[in-house]
Image (cartoon, coloured by chain):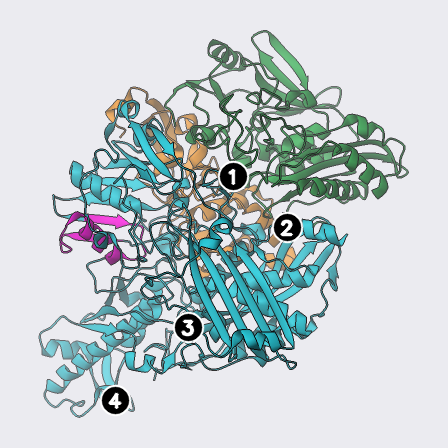
């Protein structure tokens, strides 16, 4: 998986990635983002800045949304990681993924996996109760195509479905 | 990034021992700043000590009523902790004003204290920077400096401390618990960070072989009247141009105790306890707040690009104190400043 | 001319949506092959000068490093400038990576490290040390302003300013109302979310498949074939998904050259992805200094329009935009003088960024119109309505359509403009000053020559193919809609093959041309398929369509039938079977109608209404409401169309308030070269945005009635924000972006 020369420094870790246990040897300087996009061939997690400034690399680690570009993979031994590929696939999309399609909550699609993972994390956290709070608590995900209002619509809709009430009315 | 060797510490003693063995090593917790800086080649430790497994993740109320926050408590866990929200809402609010939800999930309490400065020239290894490379000069002086410090600067460095959390901790007179090879000691929060002086390479007073293990907050009286007000270039996910942590203990609209700490204006969270003390007994009104603001900013000096921060700081202090006095703290998701 | 729509014109969800939301749409860097090499680029840390020496020894010692390229060992490439000029290159000598030790701009690539892993390349790159002989750069447009010149060689496709008409100076001098003001705009960077990247899959010495982040696969193919002497038949460039570009991907980027160079040299597959910092090195919206002078008579009718602009360019190319021309065609005015110059700085060549030229020029014009309205004392919307013209005075041409009145009316109504209190600082909300501002937007609705193929198969499946690109604009989806509509099949039955240089020729995805150009080509190809099917049908024995003409038949429910009586017809499958064919395919070609263009010209229009709230003491500004009413001809898909306008509004808000690439003029370096310090709007900055598409029928702009939407959304937005800020504060801000410090400083004067 890794180049032979790097293997002398490689450290064994076990992670659960999208529900599957993976035993890996990783060099300490490999970030989770580069591990996913490189050797794991899971490019759904995007690199937009590589410095925690855009949110495109957002994944869920033990259910919490995190910038994978700033996580060294070696520190994640035992962690459960969910990427966009693990949330849902065409044919059986996650409710958030479907809502993003329905609301056209993207254009180029590059920030989208990060937005969706972030929205999933947002819902797990349970701290957003209004559109303003959604906006504030989604602000770690930049979208240069400017789909913000549609993204908020998509998240609002799914939150409403899940709470069994009209979320918009509840918020007002 | 420079390649490095990796040590996974299992307990505090082990981490301290590893640090003592190699004071050039760096502790890795959330990684939100260290990994960032390593990728920019601003910090290139030969050894990284992973402390994520250390048992420093609890928030506990001590017998004397103090709150003890473990160094590895995440910023998010801290901000949403019911006890913190109830007793130290200023701290919770300040944390939520910083960074993004993703970063707050990863970043830790100890790491937040140890964030390196926010300065274009520090972050660019080919620019001169006395903090990164002592003696190389300061690129920001005479350069692009609208985000830089107006207080406590030196001819060597005009950088600011980037934290929001620390501004609240400064206002609340927190205590930093650190552990080194000779055991534990406390550092008063205002003594923890330092001004750049002629040695801007040192951000704080932590010894090279010491680590932060916890923050303690004493039982206090600021839960009712407080506000954290942050002014920045966009409405979220941006560093402060100026931020203010304000807290007042009042009796019959008269000030018993008042605290004002400033972020985004100095190499450390900025406070003036003497000026605060002089407010005791005065009415909690705009005139008092203005006087205090002017005292705090008495020595402020702009660098050209950041001159605006002086009036901005004055006005933000007054507004934050007004919010605090009226019991209507700034809500971080509310972009209107009430 | 159009059949009643079943799919075209409906808010269809993107057909590529499920792939995008599940992370399974592959972008340029997301292609894999065993043994792939990785590249990392070393950037110059000076803006001008020369490399004295370059030491790669430490980097070479990093395990996994395969080779390091510098100007000292770069494999040879084309010599003539013409070989390096891509399809939209401005006049000059294009930048050639690693060719010489000379440094032309900050962040210029000076070395390429190729290694077995990404990390080895990245980490070795940080160990390359370069000694420079630095010279003193000049990057300040204000300083070089006196050296401004009119570009001798014009950039292809960029209309130079028209000759002066009337007597603008005299009319100005004698007019009842006059304003003259200077507007400053700092340089911006596109910052699409995806980093520029190229993956080269090496097959043999001649044959390559290249996944490139580009707005034109064929432009990238031609570029590398010209430079490396490859045969265009042996090189395939693909750009299936492009993570935003906004014009930055119109010209091939240096990672394409470097990845192909290394691949050919090492005979291996190579991937090179830029860093975010590197995204600031090449292609930016140039800084500009503009002077606009407007004069009106006592009735508010424009008497004189003068607009002079100076824009930054590099030392090695004369990059040009259409900046001032808009001022000569926006409103009725018989006296106009429009002039455009360039001034060289030690930076990389600027490039097209969303609505290039218009975003800049209309910002100045529409700010000036607001100033004139204030001077006259009339409502800014009324001033614009008064001076409306349905004609292009620049070119003496008719307009194909101009539903701008409807934009004004419907936009104003949705916004509630009539409730506006005219005086500045007269509307308040708590601590906030409230301001309402508006502006008009303009963009040329162009077409570029484009080809497309359409195939109808016996199983009812339709394939639409063209080299066109979808950079998030919705190209996949609208082409599927056109295909579905033409053959009366569900959208799921249409396969859209685009983003591949081997497919029918199209131009780059830019200028808002794709829908009109490629969309028309698809329509024409589909018509040709139908005509062929009719021919075949008429060959059949006892054909009920024997005497039908092509325009009399339509496809309904899998049958070719008479439009007037759908009972009369033949099943398409029977037609194909009669010729023993499994499918029929035709090529369609679309392009501008040159004859018509002598008389007509086509523009899109908008009216943008903005509300801002500004904290009077703190200078904190929020854009709380935007209504954008758009006249852009036929809307193929209101869902994706709306998204394009929303995106333009958001970028316009960034342009107005946040975006500036900050240069340290002592060193000529951009210091905020990251997304933490170059602020693009975040979620919290964007409140309610409303988009209105007004009815606009246009049968000349393009064969399918489409005008294009990619640019018009941003034009006018920054001016409307600035005008709203004036209305809120009474201060005219003419230096963009209008950051919080500027607002605070003006409010200090008010206090």
The chain containing the residue under callout 4 comes to C
Do callouts 1 and 2 mark residues in contact (Cβ within 8 Å)? Answer: no
Chain A takes which shade in the image?
Answer: orange
Label 4: few (<14), some or many (≥20) within 10 Å? Answer: few
Residue bearing mark 2:
C742
Viewport quadrant of the N terminus of chain C: bottom left
Residue bearing mark 1:
B102
Do callouts 1 and 3 mark residues in contact (Cβ within 8 Å)? Answer: no
For the residue pair C356 and C151, the one nearer the viewer reads as: C151
Residues at marks 4 and 2, CA–CA distance in whole angstroms = 65 Å
**Mark 2 against mark 3, which lies toward the viewer?**
3
Residue bearing mark 4:
C552
**Mark 1 against mark 2, which lies toward the viewer?**
2
Residues at marks 2 and 3, CA–CA distance in whole angstroms = 35 Å
**Mark 4 against mark 2, which lies toward the viewer?**
2
Q: Quadrant of residue B245?
A: top right
Label 2: few (<14), some or many (≥20) within 10 Å? Answer: some
Callouts 1 and 3 on one subunit? no
Residues at marks 4 and 1, CA–CA distance in whole angstroms = 61 Å
User: Is C494 situated above or below B178?
Assistant: below
At a point 55% along the width and 40% down the height, the residue shown is B101
Where's residue C427, x and y in %? 73, 63
- Mark 2 and mark 3 lie on one chain; the one further toward the N terminus is 3
Residue bearing mark 3:
C162
Where's residue B140, x and y in %? 55, 34
Residues at marks 1 and 2, CA–CA distance in whole angstroms = 32 Å
Q: Please give the range of residues in magenta.
A: C209-238
The chain coloured cyan in the image: C
Chain B takes which shade in the image?
Answer: green
Do callouts 4 and 1 mark residues in contact (Cβ within 8 Å)? Answer: no
- Mark 4 and mark 3 lie on one chain; the one further toward the N terminus is 3
């Amino acid at each position: 998986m890794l180049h032979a020369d790097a293997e002398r420094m490689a450290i064994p870790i076990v992670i659960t990635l999208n529900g599957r246990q993976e035993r890996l040897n990783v060099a300490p300087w490999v970030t989770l983002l580069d591990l996913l996009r490189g050797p794991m061939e899971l490019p759904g997690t995007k690199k937009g800045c590589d410095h925690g400034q855009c949110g495109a690399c957002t994944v869920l680690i033990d259910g919490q949304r995190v910038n994978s570009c700033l996580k060294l993979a070696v520190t994640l031994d035992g962690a459960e990681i969910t990427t966009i590929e693990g949330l849902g696939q065409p044919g059986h999309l996650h409710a958030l993924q479907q809502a993003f399609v329905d609301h056209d909550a993207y254009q180029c699609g590059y920030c989208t996996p990060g937005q969706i993972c972030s929205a999933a994390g947002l819902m797990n956290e349970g701290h957003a109760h209004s559109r303003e709070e959604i906006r504030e608590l989604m602000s770690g995900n930049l979208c240069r195509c400017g789909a913000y209002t549609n993204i908020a619509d998509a998240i609002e809709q799914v939150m409403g479905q899940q709470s069994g009430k009209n979320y918009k009315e509840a918020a007002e | 990034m420079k390649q490095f060797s990796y040590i996974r510490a299992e307990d505090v003693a082990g981490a301290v021992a590893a640090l003592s063995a190699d004071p050039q090593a760096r502790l890795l917790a959330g990684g939100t700043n260290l990994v960032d800086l390593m990728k920019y080649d601003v910090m290139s430790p030969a050894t990284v000590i992973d402390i994520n497994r250390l048992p420093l993740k609890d928030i506990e109320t001590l017998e004397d009523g103090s709150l003890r926050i473990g160094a590895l408590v995440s910023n998010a866990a801290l901000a949403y902790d019911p006890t913190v929200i109830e007793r130290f809402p200023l701290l919770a609010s300040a944390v939520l004003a910083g960074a993004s939800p993703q970063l707050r999930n990863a970043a830790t309490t100890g790491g937040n204290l140890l964030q390196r400065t926010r300065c274009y020239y520090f972050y660019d290894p080919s620019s001169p920077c006395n903090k990164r490379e002592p003696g190389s000069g300061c690129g920001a002086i005479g350069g692009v400096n609208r985000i830089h410090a107006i207080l406590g600067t030196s001819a060597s460095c005009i950088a600011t401390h980037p934290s929001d959390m620390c501004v609240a901790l400064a206002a609340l007179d927190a205590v930093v618990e650190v552990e080194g090879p000779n055991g534990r000691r406390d550092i008063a929060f205002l003594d923890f960070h330092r001004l750049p002086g002629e040695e801007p390479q040192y951000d704080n007073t932590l010894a090279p072989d010491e680590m932060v293990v916890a923050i303690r907050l004493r039982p206090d009286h600021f839960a009712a009247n407080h506000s954290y007000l942050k002014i920045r270039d966009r409405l979220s996910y941006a560093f402060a141009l100026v931020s203010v942590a304000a807290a007042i203990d009042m009796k019959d609209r008269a000030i018993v105790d008042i605290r004002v700490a400033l972020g985004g204006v100095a190499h450390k969270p900025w406070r003036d306890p003497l000026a605060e003390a002089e407010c005791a007994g005065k009415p909690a009104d705009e005139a008092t707040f203005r006087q205090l603001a002017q005292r705090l900013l008495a020595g402020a000096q702009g660098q050209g690009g950041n001159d605006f921060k002086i009036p901005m700081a004055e006005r933000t202090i007054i507004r934050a104190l007004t919010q605090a006095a009226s019991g209507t703290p700034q809500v971080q998701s509310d972009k209107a400043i009430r | 001319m159009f059949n009643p729509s079943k799919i075209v014109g409906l808010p269809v969800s993107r057909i590529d949506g499920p792939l995008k939301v599940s992370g399974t749409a592959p972008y340029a860097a997301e292609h894999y092959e065993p043994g792939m090499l990785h590249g990392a680029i070393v950037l110059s840390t000076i803006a001008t000068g020369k490399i004295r020496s370059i030491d790669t020894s430490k980097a070479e010692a990093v395990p996994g490093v395969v080779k390091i390229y510098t100007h000292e060992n770069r494999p040879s490439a084309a010599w003539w400038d013409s070989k390096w000029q891509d399809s939209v290159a401005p006049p000059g000598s294009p930048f050639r990576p690693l060719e010489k030790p000379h440094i032309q701009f900050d962040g210029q690539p000076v070395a390429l490290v190729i290694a077995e892993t990404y990390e080895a390349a990245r980490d070795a790159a940080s160990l390359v040390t370069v000694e420079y002989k630095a010279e003193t750069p000049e990057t300040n447009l204000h300083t070089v302003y006196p050296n401004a010149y009119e570009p001798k060689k014009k950039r292809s496709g960029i209309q130079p300013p028209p000759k002066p008409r009337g007597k603008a100076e005299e009319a100005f001098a004698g007019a009842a109302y006059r304003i003259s003001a200077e507007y400053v705009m700092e340089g911006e960077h596109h910052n699409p979310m995806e980093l520029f990247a190229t993956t080269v899959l090496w097959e043999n010495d001649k044959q390559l498949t290249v996944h490139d982040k580009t707005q034109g696969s064929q432009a990238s193919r031609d570029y590398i074939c010209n430079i490396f002497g490859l045969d265009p038949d042996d090189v395939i460039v693909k750009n299936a998904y492009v993570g935003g570009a906004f014009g930055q991907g119109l010209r091939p980027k240096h990672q394409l050259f470097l990845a192909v160079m290394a691949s050919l040299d090492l005979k291996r597959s190579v991937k090179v992805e830029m860093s975010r910092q590197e995204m600031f090195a090449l292609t930016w919206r140039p800084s500009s200094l503009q002077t606009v002078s407007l004069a009106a008579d006592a009735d508010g009718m424009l008497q004189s329009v003068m607009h002079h602009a100076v824009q930054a360019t590099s030392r090695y190319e004369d990059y040009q935009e259409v900046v001032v021309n808009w001022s000569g065609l926006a409103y009725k005015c018989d006296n106009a003088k429009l002039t455009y110059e360039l001034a060289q700085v030690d930076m990389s060549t600027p490039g097209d960024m969303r609505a290039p030229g218009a975003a800049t020029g209309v910002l100045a014009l529409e700010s000036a119109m607001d100033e004139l309205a204030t001077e006259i004392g009339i409502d800014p919307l009324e001033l614009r309505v008064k001076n409306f013209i349905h004609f292009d005075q620049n070119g003496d041409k008719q307009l194909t359509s101009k539903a701008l009145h409807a934009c004004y009316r419907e936009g104003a109504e949705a916004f509630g403009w009539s409730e506006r209190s005219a005086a500045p600082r007269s509307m308040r909300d708590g601590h906030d000053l409230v301001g309402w501002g508006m502006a008009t937007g303009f963009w040329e609705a162009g077409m570029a020559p484009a080809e497309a193929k359409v195939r109808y198969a016996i199983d009812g499946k339709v394939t639409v193919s063209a080299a066109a690109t979808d950079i998030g604009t919705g190209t996949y989806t609208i082409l599927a809609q056109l295909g579905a509509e033409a053959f009366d099949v569900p959208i799921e039955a249409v396969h859209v093959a685009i983003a591949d240089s081997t497919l029918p020729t199209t131009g780059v995805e830019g200028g808002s041309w794709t829908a009109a150009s490629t969309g028309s080509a698809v329509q024409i190809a589909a018509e040709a398929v139908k005509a062929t099917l009719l021919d075949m049908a008429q060959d059949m024995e006892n054909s009920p369509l024997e005497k039908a003409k092509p325009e009399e038949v339509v496809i309904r429910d899998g049958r070719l039938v008479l439009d007037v009586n759908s009972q009369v017809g033949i099943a398409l499958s029977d037609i194909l079977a009669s010729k023993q064919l499994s499918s029929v395919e035709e090529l369609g070609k679309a392009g501008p109608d040159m004859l018509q263009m002598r008389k007509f010209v086509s523009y899109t229009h908008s009216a943008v209404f903005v509300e801002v709230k500004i904290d009077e003491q703190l200078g904190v500004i929020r854009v709380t409401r935007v209504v954008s009413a758009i006249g852009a001809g036929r809307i193929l898909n209101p869902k994706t169309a709306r998204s394009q306008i929303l995106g333009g509004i958001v970028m316009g808000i960034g342009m107005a308030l946040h975006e500036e690439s900050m240069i340290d003029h002592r060193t000529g370096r951009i210091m905020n070269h990251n997304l933490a310090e170059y602020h693009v709007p975040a979620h919290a900055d964007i409140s309610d945005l409303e988009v209105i598409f007004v009815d606009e029928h246009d049968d000349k702009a393009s064969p399918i009635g489409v005008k294009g939407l990619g640019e018009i959304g941003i034009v006018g937005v920054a001016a409307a924000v600035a005008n709203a800020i004036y209305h809120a504060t009474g201060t005219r801000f003419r230096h963009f972006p209008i950051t919080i410090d500027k607002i605070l400083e003006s409010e200090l004067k008010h206090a």
